[in-house]
Image: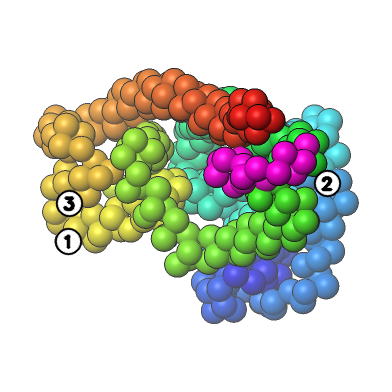
Amino acid sequence: MSVFAYTAVGRDGRQSTGTLSADSRSAAIAQVVGQGLHPVKVDEQKADAARKQAAPAAAGGRVSQKAVANFTRELANLLAGGVPLSRSLSLLKRESSNPAARALWVAVHDDVVGGTSLADSLAKWPATFSTVYIAMVRAGEAGGFLDVVLSQIAEFRTREQDLKGKVKAALVYPVILGIVATAVLIFLLTFFIPKFTPLFSQFGANLPFLTQVIIAASNFLKSYGIYAAVVLVVAIVALKRGIATDAGRRRLEMTFLQVPVLGQVMANFALVRFARMLGTLVGAGVPLVASLKVAREAIGNQVLADTVLHAIEQVQRGEALSRALASSPKLFPPSVVETIAVAEETGRLDKELVRVSVTYEGDLDRQLRLLVSVAEPMLLLVMAGLIGTVVIGMLLPIFNLQDVIK
């Protein structure tokens, strides 16, 4: 999407200038006309001009998500209080204490004052505002309820951060156990075992098979450990690049979804995000199809998002939402489909979707706790088993020392 600078004349004869984002010059002209203006000049900005426009925020550094959340909540409150959008943005840019955030709010304010829609202005900063955020703002502007949508975004982001925080907290202890186990094994193989190797070589007897394997592993790690580390780093980099591609990401997501417990947790996480977003948008008055398209972006799993895309096509053909979602049992269990069907009949779709998200968020929390409670003892057993095997393997020759001496 390119940035276009325009000069236009309003119905009152006053001339105005501004910038907007569009796929082509004709689309930019259509946007200007849609604002009730007569375009006089519409030109695509050069890369240098775009870089200059991006310079204020870049010079201040990265804008934190906390600053974005505060901006969203405060802007929603100002708009709900009847303050015009341009004045609200002016107040927020003056009150911001963070240099990076202030520079960004200044750029957004200047765009909006120049005639650019808020969604198009935010779309110029994809590193700060997600596609879901921009889509919701665009829907709010089109429907005339921007304050409601911004308030819902703020609430959604708060709940989303809480949910992500629970997931990260659940992963902390297992990750620490894995790092500790790896560090202990490396220490034993590179420092502890080499101290015993000369002693064993003096026995002149055949060592137990387990001891031979451990000594061989120790010698390999000492001789080729650096090369093994390089190969591991290269493999990680190659894996990240593979995941960065659409096909690689889909394969990884499909693999995770097939893991018995982990796959269900991932599906429930996606369901919570989808149901909350869809309920929020429908409750704000956004049309169902448009809400489905935005909520699909919030799923975060491309494999599951593809199933929703098929459901959106069915809804566009006149199919009921519950029947369309029933074709994706991995993401939408029968109980959820039945709940949505009843909600469609009673006209409570938005409220029931939010209720489903809250219910499954509680279930997800319990699943995470169960997953961690199972993973912790398993990791402890694996760690104890590996370390114990190494220790026993090194003690076996000592147990047989009496026979060797005889």
Q: Which residue is mark 1?
A: 317
Q: Colour scheme in the image?
A: rainbow
Q: Which residue is mark 2?
A: 61
Q: Where is residue 21 shown, x and y percent of the image?
A: 62, 65
Q: Amino acid at mark 1?
A: Arg
Up the image or down, 15 lies above or below 100; here it is below
**Which residues are the magenta region?**
199-215
Q: Amino acid at mark 3?
A: Ser
Would you say residue 213 sits in the magenta stretch?
yes
Badge 2 marks a residue whose secondary structure is loop
Q: How would you rate the neighbour count of disc 1 (Cα within 10 Å): few for under 14, some for 14-19, many for 20 or more?
A: few
**Picture residue at 41% right of the left edge, 24% below the top:** 374
Q: Which residue is mark 3?
A: 327
The residue lying toward the viewer, choosing from 406 and 118, is 406
Q: Where is residue 136 shown, x and y percent of the image?
A: 48, 46
Report how far apart the C-alphas of labels 2 and 3 lie in the structure. Answer: 45 Å
Up the image or down, 325 lies above or below 365; here it is below
The residue lying toward the viewer, choosing from 84 and 232, is 232
**Picture residue at 50% right of the left edge, 48% below the top:** 132
Residue 27 horizontal side relative to residue 86, left or right: left
**Does the image show residue 235?**
yes
Identify the mark nearer the N-term, 1 or 3. Answer: 1
**Picture residue at 25% right of the left edge, 59% below the top:** 310
Identify the mark nearer the N-term, 1 or 2. Answer: 2
- Which is more foreground, mark 1 or mark 2? 2
Would you say residue 351 sits in the magenta stretch?
no
- Which is more foreground, mark 1 or mark 3? 3
Q: How would you rate the neighbour count of disc 3 (Cα within 10 Å): few for under 14, some for 14-19, many for 20 or more?
A: some
